[in-house]
Amino acid sequence: MNANDTQKFDLIVVGGGLGGLLTAARAAKAGRRVVVLEQAQELGGFGRSPELGGRPVNLGPHAIYLDGPAEKALLELGVELKGFIPGAAGFFESNGELLPLPTTALGLLTAPWLTWRERVELAWSMREVLGAPKAGVRVSDWLAGLRSERVRAFFASLIRVSTYCNANDVLTTKLAFAQLKSVLSPSARGVLYLDGGWQSVVNQLEVIAKQLGVRIRTGAKANSLSLGERVGGEGAHPRITLSDGTTLGGDEIALALPLAAAAKLTGDAALKTRAENAKPVRAACLDLVLKKLPKPERRLVLGLEQPTYFSVHSAPETKENIRVHVAWYLAPDDATDAQMERTLEAFVDRIQPGWRDELVGRRYFPHLRVMEDVPREATTTLAAPLHLISTVATTRFLFDAIAQSGSSLSLGERVGVREQVLP
């Protein structure tokens, strides 16, 4: 194909999931000519909310952290985030017993299921969590330094639910505590559960992107990427060739792809190494739609000794076809089998006895991939004109990380793939 036949854009976004759509819309709002290439026939990726029991239901539990990078980026684009704040009221489950989950500092200090020694240790430990932890300290080592087994279990449970990770030998306190602050600090606004699932965000981003002039191509698989020379020999002129032979040229290319796919497309050794050494964050998830809750007061239950999660993702005023997400946070090397589904069902039996009689729809994922890798203090990025839209590109978690990784588009450095270590 002649170079003159190449379709040219300011930015080519490879991947039409939430990260790709958000990146494209933000760039287009800044006046850039953008195209999105998605190899599937529909957009959204992990952000889709397929219908279950007559309602859109997320693929596993999702929440947006209020005041985080994702919320700010979406609101700047005009995305409406309709939903409800679930609040912190709930329970821990400990050996089959439900214990009230404290929601205030006073509640922590008066929790009847803690001894006075445990309350004192918890209070001192909470000061450390809300302080400034040192870099490089593993969560497992910090937990091991706590005297009380119950206080260790308390913090391990909160770290799991706030970071999505059950990988304390990999995750560091610097990252875990920063995430915990977004839930526990007095100024924290908490999280938002979206009424229409994350599909509502996908749909709005698609409309906004198109209104801003973004071209979106589905069924468009990127076969190869090359960094040629611009006309006149001034700098790199990246090109993407699709499976149908179409070639697209761009000033910059944003890769909103899984790590392995991004490494294969770029041929980058450092990216390949990160992908090969990654510890994917996974969960076994049971999604339910129930006609009603047998125990409506039990809306949030976190396992204290076990890495379990139960939460109602429909607003309290919803009286029928109620969305419920149940999960087991998998450790990096955990395997799952048919018994895991039975384990989650038994967990629901304890929380909502009689739920099977109210069942409208169910869906089970034995090992849903939540993030490509456990977040690290050392992040992996690409140099301009390539940009990696990924959770590994920042120290944030899930969609906040993806939203923040798009900020690399403003950088002009050309120094190759690099490792950035937090001070």
Image (cartoon, rainbow, N blue to C red):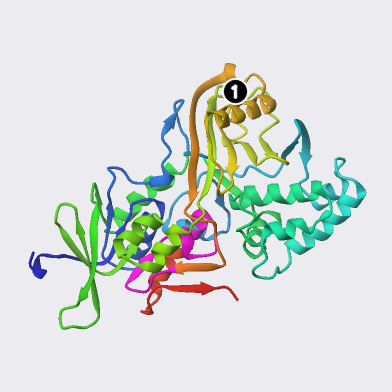
In the drawing, does residue 398 fall left or right of residue 248?
right
Task: Give residue 327's position: percent from left, percent from top.
Answer: 58, 38
Q: 196 above or below 140?
A: above
Residue drawn at x 7%, y 67% as measured from the top left: 2
In the drawing, does residue 367 fall left or right of residue 105?
left
User: In which quadrant of the rendered view does residue 48 lie?
Assistant: top left
Task: Quadrant for the C terminus, please.
Answer: bottom right
User: In which quadrant of the rendered view does residue 293 lie?
Assistant: top right
Residue 192 visible in the shown view? yes
Residue farthest top in this picture: 357
In the drawing, does residue 172 fall left or right of residue 244?
right
Task: Quadrant for the N terminus, please.
Answer: bottom left
Residue drawn at x 69%, y 56% as measured from the top left: 140
Residue drawn at x 16%, y 61% as measured from the top left: 247
Judge whether residue 384 is colored magenta. Answer: yes
Q: Total number of numbered labels?
A: 1
Report crowding for label 1: few under 14, some 14 to 19, many 20 or more residues within 10 A (C-alpha): some
For disc 1, the marked residue is 292
Range of magenta residues: 381-404
Judge whether residue 72 is colored magenta. Answer: no
Q: 44 above or below 365?
A: below
Residue farthest right in this picture: 116
Q: 84 above or below 323?
A: below
Residue drawn at x 31%, y 68% as measured from the top left: 31
Task: Give residue 409's position: percent from left, percent from top.
Answer: 38, 70
Task: Give residue 379's position: percent from left, percent from top.
Answer: 50, 67
Residue 61 visible in the shown view? no
In the drawing, does residue 157 fall left or right of residue 318?
right
Q: Secondary structure at mark 1?
A: loop
User: Callout 1, which amino acid?
Assistant: Lys
